[in-house]
Image (cartoon, rainbow, N blue to C red):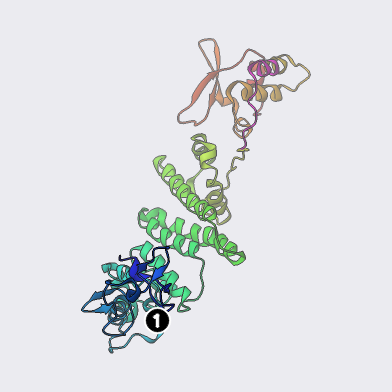
Amino acid sequence: MTRALEIYGTCVGCGAERLTPGLAPDGGKLCTDCAGGLGDFTCERCGQEARRYRRGICGRCVLTERLRELLDDGTGSVRAELLPLFDALRQMRRPWGGMTWSGHPHVQRNLRALARGEVPLTHDGLSQLTPWRSVAYLRDLLMQTGILPPADRQLLLFQRWLAEMLTTVDAEHRRLLELFAAWHVQRRLNTLADRGPLTGKQIQQARDELRLATAFLDHLAERGRALADCNQADVDAWYAGGYTARRLTHAFLRWAMRSKHMPKVAVPHRSTSNPAPLAQHHRLTLLRQTVNGDDIPLQDRVAAALVLLYAQPLTRIARLTIDDVLHEDGEALIRLGDRRRPSLSPLPGCCWTTWASGRTP
């Protein structure tokens, strides 16, 4: 019955345009007179037929009364700038929705703050309000009614998320992240927003870049380093923990090097596609050719063997020195990875002694 008292149309009985809560045998809609026995639903204040909410007053009148109180600028009148919002809400097709929304304490608090000038009636001003989901809906209403200029909703939500995220970061790292966000992440988003509405995927990438930048700074802190002291081993150890999952750290590292917040290092690049794995027999064939290929320069043979045996990236192999080759108990070992936590692996049986006695590869 509640839903029926919000339906208007042409009565199939008398042809009048009015409230049609009744149902004819053929499924048509009937007014209260033609349906018979449904009662009188005339609002005692505005004279319109509608569901009455209290004291014989319809929902539209109750909503209007509430909005006048919430949007009062302190002089007994609705704030002039908020009149378009006032008119749009009180003319809602289903006032019950407006009454439910405006009945929430946080909505009432935010509307009063805007009406009384406690918060600037701007996009930045709205960013001071909470909770953010409710504020996002209010912002949409203000833009739809022309009170606020159009703005990219996704960008505004990202800015809100960023402000909250930065409060969880320690002060030492916060300044770096604020600079990175301002000069790289938001700058890119602003450029994209100028071309068209931002997508959820673009916003997610921006968030991931900042999360990974935060995680990288924590990684350095665990190793007893600041960003200004970061070296190649720190970067390699970071990516060794999972290149694909940490690939978006590239943006932060390149920005930090350009802005001279960290020394120059090599940022590893690796295809994240999924090539067909090298078959074991094929790998062994290549390894055999490498070890026995006297026509191949020794350093190239060593590098190829390290790739085939230990899956070492070329950037790491290029940094090996003769100090990374050790002789213990008659066995030749090579030190891979972090010098502070070396991984010693046996060298394959080819002319390693000759290589170890030569210059750095």
> Measured along the vertical axis of the image, is residue 32 above or below residue 229?
below
Q: Which of 34 and 19 is in front in this view?
A: 34
> Which of the 4 image quarters holds residue 12?
bottom left
Q: Where is residue 218 in the image (x, y as percent from the top left)?
A: 41, 45
Please give the name of the residue rendered at 59% of the width and 67% of the height, measured from the top-left corner: 194
Residue assigned mark 1? 87
Q: Is residue 87 magenta?
A: no
**The residue positioned farthest toward the top in the image shown:** 330
Residue beneath the point at 60% across and 64% down? 196
Quick check: 221 above or below 146? Answer: above
Query: Callout 1, which amino acid?
Result: Asp
Quarter of the image with the N terminus is: bottom left
Give the mark count.
1
Give residue 282's position: percent from left, percent from top.
68, 18
Q: In this rendering, would 317 be left or right of 286?
A: left
Direction from residue 15 to residue 325 in the image, left or right = right
> Is disc 1 surrounded by few (<14), some (14 to 19) or many (20+) residues within 10 Å?
few
| Quarter-of-image position of residue 168 | bottom left
What segment is highlighted magenta in the picture?
Answer: 273-286
**Does the stretch in magenta take in 281?**
yes
| Residue 342 appearing in the image | yes
Q: In this view, does 179 lie to the left or right of 87?
A: right
Residues 52 and 342: in front is 52
Q: Position of residue 224 (x, y in %)?
A: 40, 42
Decide if residue 97 is in sight here.
no
